[in-house]
Amino acid sequence: LDPALMQAAEAIGSHVATPDLGAYWMPFTANRQFKQAPRLLARASGMHYWDVQGREVLDGVAGLWCVNAGHNRPRITAAIQKQAADMDFAPPFQMGHPKAFELASRIVQIAPAGMGKVFFANSGSEAVDTALKMALAYHRVRGEGTRTRLLGRDRGYHGVNFGGISVGGMVGNRKHFGLAVAGVDHLRHTHDPARNAYSNGQPAHGAEFADDLEKLVAMHDASNIAAVIVEPIAGSTGVLVPPMGYLQKLRELCTKHGILLIFDEVITGFGRTGAPFAAQTFGVTPDLITCAKGLTNGAVPMGAVIAKDEIYETFMQGPEHMIEFLHGYTYSGHPLACAAGLGTLDTYAEEGLLTRAGPQGDGIAAYFAQGVHSLKGEPHVIDVRNHGLVGGIELQGIAGEPTKRAFSVFLDCWAQGVLIRTTGDTIALSPPLIIERGHVDRIVETIRTALRRAA
Ligand code: PMP
């Protein structure tokens, strides 16, 4: 970029170190508490952030499960800069631009076989609502318009839009709002600490939780059910890894009853579990996949729905001049997001990141597993769960004050220069896929120190 322009851009941000905190209503944040002692990030590179005081912070969570290639990767930065200079925006309805088509093709190349179509949104929440609408419309187009019921799972997280909170199973995210989409039921979640505590990888017990689907079919009849949506690994509700055989069973039952299976891979997509998608890791192909986050390495907002060819073809039956799916966003396939996505997929491919956490990797996932499991026996730890480069360390909560103990560990780690994330009383880790052993050690030992102090 023109040096004069760079200078101007720097000037815009030059006084952000001490902003007025009053106006910004922060998302999913205890605003009052945060504003008393704000945690403000200013810069990032690779495995690290630097806060506004210039303090280095090791990133144990890839920002928010998204910066899979590490921060500020040059290819991605350059792609965004070039695109911003070449063309800022292109209308996505009845118009196109090459990079959107190119990115869709590139996603399909790494997606499960037979999933050959990509629809763009701008976030995980939008991808989820898009997939739910796609499922409903698909059945209507096929003349099965009675299939309107949607099934989710307890402790599922599918973003915050109305569809997502309805199929989601986090009651807290719903109860403030009253209204939700009607006709939704939930399967039980698969968390079963009595049988599966401290599993390394997939728990052995619990495939039978998938039989809940049969119960709901018996209650409503399959002819009234459109789709079931699950996260292959539930992330935001505490890292719940699917028991052996569970997803296979769910797939069999969905196929048997003509119900679409949606995998919400917003967290598990793009290498987190050792394959491009968890569908491949677990050997189960859904009908629709939702993704976001790692799609652009978090650099520009983007979400997507990957669909089986058969679903797309079903929509393509009417007159050619008709719009087949009456849905889309102003920013679907935004040029900057597409450029970021292409730069991201190039970076993943060049560095083998999409399979690094799997069996073909260099052993980093096993090292990470060993590290997180070494926390067994530390104060308050009641379970450790992991798969690929995702880890969950569950703590015994303080009675009547869920989240308090884990959050105190979060604050202690932050003070020690390590960013972790907590959800309820579980510490969730999802480091950038470029993590090295020394970083794993630092994260684990920082948590260990914080746990002992929390005692
Ligand atoms: N689905 C899942 C599984 C997620 O983990 C998230 C976000 N953590 C979402 C959907 C929502 O994504 P977004 O915040 O981009 O809307």
Image: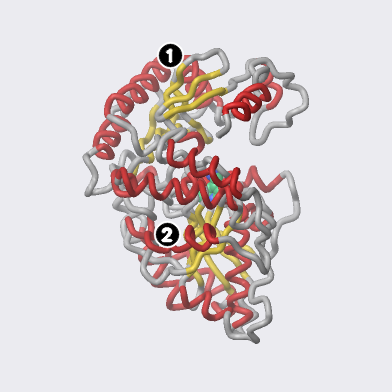
- Could you say whether the residue bearing mark 2 is in a helix, strand or loop? helix
Sequence-wise, the earlier of marks 1 and 2 is: 2
Whether residue 336 is visible: yes
From the viewer's perspective, is 437 left or right of 61?
Answer: left
User: In the image, residue 290 lies at what x, y percent?
Assistant: 51, 58
Query: Callout 1: 10 Å neighbours few (<14), some, many (20+)?
Result: few
**Which residue is found at the position 43% from the left and 16% from the top?**
455
Residue 430 vertical placement versus 307 (above, below):
above
- Could you say whether the residue bearing mark 1 is in a helix, strand or loop? helix
Q: Which quadrant of the figure has residue 429?
A: top left
Check the picture and name the quadrant holding the N terminus. Answer: top right
Give me the C-alpha separation between circle 1 and circle 2. Answer: 47 Å
User: In the image, residue 70 lies at what x, y percent?
Assistant: 41, 35
Residue tagged by mark 1?
A: 453
**Label number found at residue 106:** 2
Q: Is mark 2 within 8 Å of ligand 1?
A: no
Q: Nearer the viewer, mark 1 or mark 2?
A: 2
Q: Which quadrant of the figure has residue 438?
A: top left
Going by the numbered disc 2, the residue's amino acid type is Arg
User: In the image, residue 246 lies at what x, y percent?
Assistant: 37, 60
